[in-house]
Structure formats: C-alpha cells, structure tokens
C-alpha cells in the first residue's frame, strides 16, 4: 500500500513540475502577434511562471519554497538591467550578476529568438494583467 501511495505521489509531483498551466498556449490567441503567443508559450515552458507568476506579479508557486521575491514585471522602476525587449533579452542571456542577492539565472542555451519572444511577453505582462 505504501509503495502505491509513493508512486501516485511521485506521479503527481512530476505532473505538477512538467505542466504548463494551459499547455503554454494563449487562450483566445486569434489575432495575437505570433511572437507574443510564442513568448507566452516559452514563458511557461521555461518555467518563468514558477517564480514570476502567471501574471508576472512575482507571486509564482516557487517563491514560497525558495523564500525569494522575484521581479514583479509591473514595477518598471525596480528593473535592474532595463525593461525594454533588448535589455530583458540580455538579462535572460546573462542572468543578474550585479546583485548577489538575485537568483535570476542565465539562459544562454535559449536562442536569440526565444529570448526575444519571452522578453516581448514580459513587456506585455508589465502593462497588461488580463492576458490575451
């Protein structure tokens, strides 16, 4: 009985870890810029949502586990390395190294296009809380 419970618990944990909410797809994305929709997909796929939250408010499920306060994308003045698409893309590539308290990792394995798409979606989240 205990083995069955452990297997079920492991399956649920793995399902949670690898799920992308709504599959990473923009709901009602007809007429939405394809790069923005791809950015949303990458945001979920790359687990940005786990720390920054679905709406980019810095309230993702891992914040409580890690004891961190990730960037709330709507607080433009708090961005450490700029808040434009190019600056956010650069931050995704190199992480945040100027602040030793930051846990923002680098994502050098992403293509320039993937980083640009995520950055485009982050800029979108900074001003739009309703989603697509």
Image: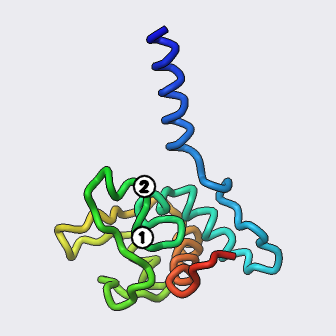
Q: Quadrant of residue 24?
A: bottom right
* Quadrant (top left/top right/bottom left/bottom right) for the C terminus: bottom right
**In percent of the image, x 52 and y 83: which residue is there?**
123
Tell me the tag on residue 61. Answer: 2
* Residue matched to label 1: 92
Left or right: residue 85 versus residue 69 is right
Q: Nearer the viewer, residue 96 or 27?
A: 27
- By what rule are the colours in the image chosen? rainbow
**1 or 2: tag closer to the N-terminus:** 2
Q: Label 2, secondary structure: give it.
A: loop
Query: 119 above or below 54?
Result: below
Task: Please say if 66 is above or below 9.
Answer: below
SS assignment at label 1: helix
Q: Are marks 1 and 2 in contact (CB under 8 Å)?
A: no
Crowd around label 2: few <14 · some 14–19 · many ≥20 (10 Å): some
Tell me how many marks there are: 2
Q: Residue at x 46, y 19 (%)?
A: 6
Q: Residue furthest top?
A: 1
Question: Where is residue 42 drawn, in percent x and y?
Answer: 58, 63
Q: Position of residue 25 (x, y in %)?
A: 70, 61
């Amino acid at each position: 009985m205990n083995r069955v419970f452990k297997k079920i618990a492991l399956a649920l944990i793995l399902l949670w870890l690898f799920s992308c909410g709504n599959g990473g797809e923009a709901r009602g994305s007809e007429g939405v810029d394809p790069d923005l929709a791809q950015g949303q997909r990458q945001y979920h796929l790359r687990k940005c949502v786990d720390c920054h939250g679905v709406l980019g408010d810095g309230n993702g499920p891992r914040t409580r586990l890690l004891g961190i306060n990730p960037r709330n994308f709507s607080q433009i003045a708090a961005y450490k390395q700029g808040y434009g698409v190019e600056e956010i893309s650069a931050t995704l590539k190199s992480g945040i190294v100027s602040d030793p308290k930051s846990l923002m990792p680098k994502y050098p394995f992403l293509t320039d296009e993937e980083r640009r798409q995520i950055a485009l979606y982050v800029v979108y989240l900074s001003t739009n809380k309703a989603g697509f």
